[in-house]
Image (spheres, rainbow, N blue to C red):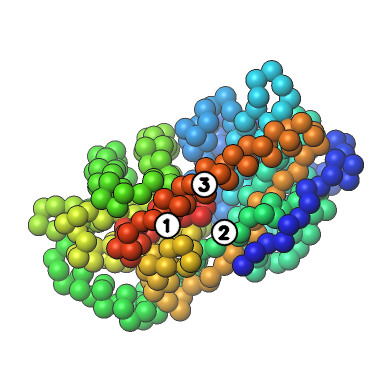
Amino acid sequence: MRIRRIKPPSISAMGSKMRGLLPGYTPEVDTVSEHAWHQILEQFEDANVYQTWSYDEVRCGRENISHLVLKKDGDIVAVAQARILKLPFLKVGIAYVRWGPLWRRRKGDSNPETFHQAIRALRNEYACRRGLVLRLYPALFRDDSSCFASILNEEGFASLGTELPDRTLLLDLTRPLEDLRTGLRPHWRRALKTAEKSGLEIIEGSDEELFGRFVRMYREMIGRKRFAEPNDINEFRLIQNRLPAKFKMRILLCMTGGDLCAGLVCSAIGNTAFYLFGATSTVGLKSRGSYLLHWKLIGWLKQNGVAIYDLHGINPELNPGTYRFKADLCGNNARDVFFLGRFDSYSNVPSYAWVFCGDRLRTIYRTLRRKVAEGTPRAAAQDPGYSALLTPQSD
C-alpha cells in the first residue's frame, strides 16, 4: 500500500504567524522537572516509553529535549516531549515528537478538540516561535476517526507522502485469557503446548542483571544471523537504568537445562504495551521458548490492567516469517492497523531545506541497511527471536 505524494505546506499557506488557542487553553513550555514529567505521564492512557524523559535524554542529551504542557482551565489536558536537533548558531533545525502529543487522559473524555489545540500549541512554539521544522508522529491509526487527518491539515501539517505507512497488530487484552488462547492460530497453539510441556524455566523482572543477560543473548543472535542491528539495544539499556521503577521495561528470559534459550523486552506505561526486542540463543532454536514467553507476558499484562499489546511492527513482504509468528499469536483477537503517519509543519524555509537534505541521507542509509536485512538467510527470517528486529517503527 502506498501513500500519495503530498506537497509540504507552503510558507505562504500558514506563514509564521501564531494562531490563538481556544478560550481556557494555555500552554507552558519547559517549566517541569524530570520527576514532575513522569508524574504527569501517569495521567495519560496513551503514555509510552518514547515520551519519557529518559528516552530522549539518552538519544539526544538533556539539553536537546523540550516539554510542552497544555492546560484547560488550569488542568493538564495534553503534553508532548520534543527532541530538538539544530545547527549551531543558526535558527535551523527540527523538533520531533514521537508518539505524541499525549491527550487521552485516564480520567476524562478523549475529546479530539484537545488534540487539535495541542498540535496548534506545538506549532506555535516550535515552528513559528523557534523557526524549526515540527515533525509529529502521533499514535493514531487510519481506522480511527478521519477527523485527525483533517485537523492536521487545518493546522498546517502535511504528511510525509513518500513513506510507506507503518503497520502493526494490536492484540485486545480486555478479552478473557481463555478466549485469547482459543483465538491462537492452531500452529501457534501447538507450539505453546510443546513449550509448556518441555520444563522450561521463566525468569522475569526489570533489573540491570536481567537486561545484561538479554543483551548478551541478543548480541549472539545478531552475530549468528549476520545482519545489521536496526536498533541500538545499548541505548535501551541506558534508558532502562534512568527510567523510574514503575516505567521500567519488563524483561522475560527462558531457560532450558540451565542455559538461556529465549528472551524478550516489553514496555508497558500507559494503556498499551509494546514488544521492543526479542532474541533466541543457539541452544534455544528448537525450544519454542519464544511462544511461552509471549504467553506469560500476556498473562502479566492482563494482571496489571493493560488493555492492548502492540506487536510493534509487521511487514509481510520484507519479513514474512515474523509476520506469521505475530499474526498467529494474535489470531482472531487483534486489529491489523496502519499508522496515520508522520507530519511536518514549518515556517522557516532554511530549516525545511536542511531537514529535507537530512531526510535524503537517512533514506540512503536505511536503504543500504534494508538490503543487508533482505540478504539475511531465510532461517533468520523464520526465527521468532527475529520478530522485533526489523520493526518499521524505529527512528
Mark 2: secondary structure: loop
**How far apart, in angstroms, are the residues tagged by discs 3 and 1?**
12 Å
Kindly report the distance in space between the C-alpha atoms of the residues bearing marks 2 and 1: 18 Å
Which numbered tag is attached to residue 374?
Answer: 1
Residue to which mark 2 is pinned: 166
Inter-mark Cα distance, 3 to 2: 15 Å
- Report the label total: 3
Name the disc covering residue 315, or none. none
The crowd level at tag 2 (other Cα within 10 Å; few <14, some 14-19, many 20+) is some
Amino acid under label 2?
Answer: Asp
**Mark 1, residues whose alpha carbon is within 10 Å: few (<14), some, or many (≥20)?**
some
Disc 3: which residue: 366
Residue 71 location (% of width, % of height): 72, 42
- Which circle's residue, 2 or 1, is located before the other in the chain? 2
Amino acid type, residue under disc 1 in the picture: Glu
As displayed, is residue 77 above or below residue 91?
Answer: below
Q: Earlier in the sequence, mark 3 or mark 2?
A: 2
Q: Are marks 3 and 1 in contact (CB under 8 Å)?
A: no
- Say which of 74 and 84 sits in front: 84
Secondary structure beneath label 3 = helix
Quadrant location of the N terminus?
Answer: bottom right
User: In screen coordinates, is 338 left or right of 153?
Assistant: left
Q: Name the one closer to the observer, 318 or 315.
A: 318
Q: Amino acid at mark 3?
A: Arg
Q: Look at discs 3 and 2 and give the one toward the viewer.
A: 3
Question: Which residue sits at x=49%, y=72%?
Answer: 334
Label located before the other in sequence (3 or 1): 3
